[in-house]
Image (cartoon, rainbow, N blue to C red):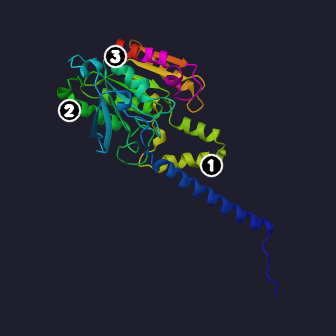
């Protein structure tokens, strides 16, 4: 008896189903890898390379006690033996970077050095899953990483007498994901009974977590359906949906002076994000200073590297006025 052959349509349906399953599984593993892969990279530069005095420090993140590694650089006057302190600035790096990485922005030469020379103490540190800090995946693009910043505040509280600093006179600088992290952390700090952070300088931060992910996937040519699958996994794989947290929604809690900087030609995070957060800050806190600089820099987080003199003037000038 002759065996009945399946129709071309049935074979096509089987093939389509198998392909769909393959795409779903592939998107799952790609998403899981993105959330958990190691961001640990060696330092390109140490404070000693710039003749900056520093102390290596370790402290736990506030909630989950992840070990955070950092460098404390005293203000120039303190390093010379004076008791004078202009305040202390926390410096928060971006995604897939660290406190000693040289990229579009050099946190040591572009940020820490001019603040040190102006008399500010500086605390740089590696976020969890980055640099020499401990691991606790997934990376949440700022929301859980905020606990590392809060741990840094707790650490400065403990060291305030020994180092001659006022831990209730802190500023914060954050770039890209570090800018989002800084917003979340400052909002949490300001909800406490005795806030520590008095001003924030935010460079190239996104307003909504989903947007830079979609933008990057689009630039990379990822098909729309696959984008949707990846975003779906990003929302359900972590214990908490990381896409539901948006920095712009926390601006209402930031009743402190704010300065937003963004490159006009940024293709990774829209400059409109900085404009939206600036306008939200002015609306929510009309009596508190808020400033915005859409710079002519050519790419994401490149303003300090491409326009170092003007950037330094604005950075130091801002903290000198408000801290």
Separation of disc 3 and disc 2 at Cα? 24 Å
Picture coordinates of residue 41, whole percent (x, y): 44, 44
Which of the numbered marks, if any, corresponds to residue 118?
A: 3
Answer with the quarter of the image where residue 76 lies: top left
Q: Which residues are magenta?
A: 295-315
Queried whether the magenta region covers residue 306, the answer comes back as yes
In the image, is residue 244 above or below residue 265?
below
Precedes in sequence: disc 2 or disc 1: 2
Picture coordinates of residue 46, whole percent (x, y): 38, 34
The foreground one among 72 and 227 is 72
Which of the numbered marks, if any, corresponds to residue 158?
A: 2
Picture coordinates of residue 142, whole percent (x, y): 42, 37
In the image, is residue 37 above or below residue 157?
below
Which of the numbered marks, if any, corresponds to residue 226?
A: 1
Q: Are marks 3 and 2 in contact (CB under 8 Å)?
A: no
In the image, is residue 246 above or below residue 29?
above
Name the front one of labels 3 and 1. Answer: 3
Separation of disc 3 and disc 1 at Cα? 49 Å
Q: Which residue is drawn at the image coordinates 29% and 21% (left, top)? A: 75
Name the front one of labels 3 and 2. Answer: 3
- Does the image show residue 80? yes
Q: Are marks 2 and 1 in contact (CB under 8 Å)?
A: no
């Amino acid at each position: 008896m002759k065996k009945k052959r399946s129709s071309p349509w049935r074979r096509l349906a089987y093939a389509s189903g198998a392909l769909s399953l393959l795409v779903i599984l592939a998107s799952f593993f790609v998403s899981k890898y993105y959330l958990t892969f190691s961001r640990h990279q060696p330092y390109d530069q140490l404070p000693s390379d710039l003749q900056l005095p520093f102390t290596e420090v370790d402290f736990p993140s506030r909630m989950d006690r992840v070990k955070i590694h950092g460098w404390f650089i005293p203000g120039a006057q303190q390093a010379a033996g004076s008791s004078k302190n202009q305040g202390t600035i926390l410096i928060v790096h971006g995604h897939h970077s660290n406190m000693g990485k040289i990229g579009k922005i050099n946190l040591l030469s572009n940020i820490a050095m001019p603040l040190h020379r102006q008399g500010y103490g500086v605390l740089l540190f590696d976020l969890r899953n980055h640099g020499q800090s401990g691991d606790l995946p997934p990376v949440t693009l700022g929301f859980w990483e905020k606990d590392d910043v809060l741990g840094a505040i707790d650490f400065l509280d403990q060291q305030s007498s020994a180092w001659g600093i006022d831990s209730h006179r802190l500023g914060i600088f954050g770039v890209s994901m570090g800018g989002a992290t800084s917003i979340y952390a400052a909002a949490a700090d300001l909800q406490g009974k005795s806030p520590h952070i008095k001003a924030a300088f935010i460079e190239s931060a996104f307003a909504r977590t989903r947007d830079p992910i979609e933008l990057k996937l689009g630039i990379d040519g990822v098909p729309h359906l696959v984008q949707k699958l990846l975003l779906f996994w990003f929302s359900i794989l972590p214990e908490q949906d990381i896409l539901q947290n948006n920095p712009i929604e926390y601006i209402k809690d930031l009743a402190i002076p704010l300065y937003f900087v963004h490159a006009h030609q940024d293709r990774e995070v829209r400059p409109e994000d900085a404009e939206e957060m600036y306008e939200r800050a002015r609306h929510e806190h009309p009596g508190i200073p808020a400033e915005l600089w859409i710079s002519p820099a050519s790419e994401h987080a490149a303003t300090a590297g491409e326009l170092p003199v003007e950037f330094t003037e604005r950075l130091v000038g801002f903290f000198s006025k408000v801290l």
